[in-house]
Image (cartoon, helix red, strand yellow):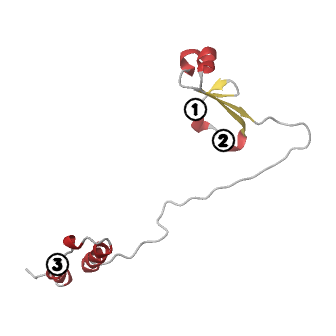
Amino acid sequence: MVLVDGVERDFNDLDPNEVATVSVLKDASATAVFGAKGANGVIIVTTKRGNLGAPVMSFSAAYGMQKATRIPKFIDSYTTMSDLNIALMNGAQFDQLIPQSDLNQYQNPPLH
């Protein structure tokens, strides 16, 4: 249960720039005060209040992209399998090495 300035709201609807304090009730006191709704705990959020005096302006911005910024270069199957063999040798797994004859077929596949 989330209470924002005494009103139940969704936590995802909060603007982080407006939050002044956050309190968490997670024991029997939450159940005693809020009943069954508070059984899993209560988050109490207090937002910032206005002040007397000259207005203060603030600005924040965010920028996002939904496009790949870099496309990786792919390697061929022979290089991939050769690098796998090197990794297996580094891990002392010599029984799992790919035979050179199989690597040759990756490098020069048979024509059908």
Q: Looking at the image, is mark 3 or mark 2 earlier in the sequence?
A: 2
Q: Looking at the image, is mark 3 or mark 1 earlier in the sequence?
A: 1
What is the C-alpha distance between the residues marked 1 and 2? Answer: 11 Å
Circle on res. 99: 3
In the rendered view, does 55 fall on the left or right side of 75?
A: right
- Residues 49 and 31: in front is 31
Q: Who's the residue at 61% across and 59% down the image?
A: 63
Circle on res. 10: 1
The kind of residue on which mark 1 rests is: Asp
What is the C-alpha distance between the residues marked 3 and 2? Answer: 59 Å
Q: Who's the residue at 66% across and 41% down the image?
A: 15
Q: Secondary structure at mark 1?
A: loop
Q: Looking at the image, is mark 1 or mark 2 earlier in the sequence?
A: 1
In the rendered view, does 93 fall on the left or right side of 102?
A: right
What is the C-alpha distance between the residues marked 3 and 1? Answer: 59 Å
In the rendered view, does 50 fall on the left or right side of 47?
A: right
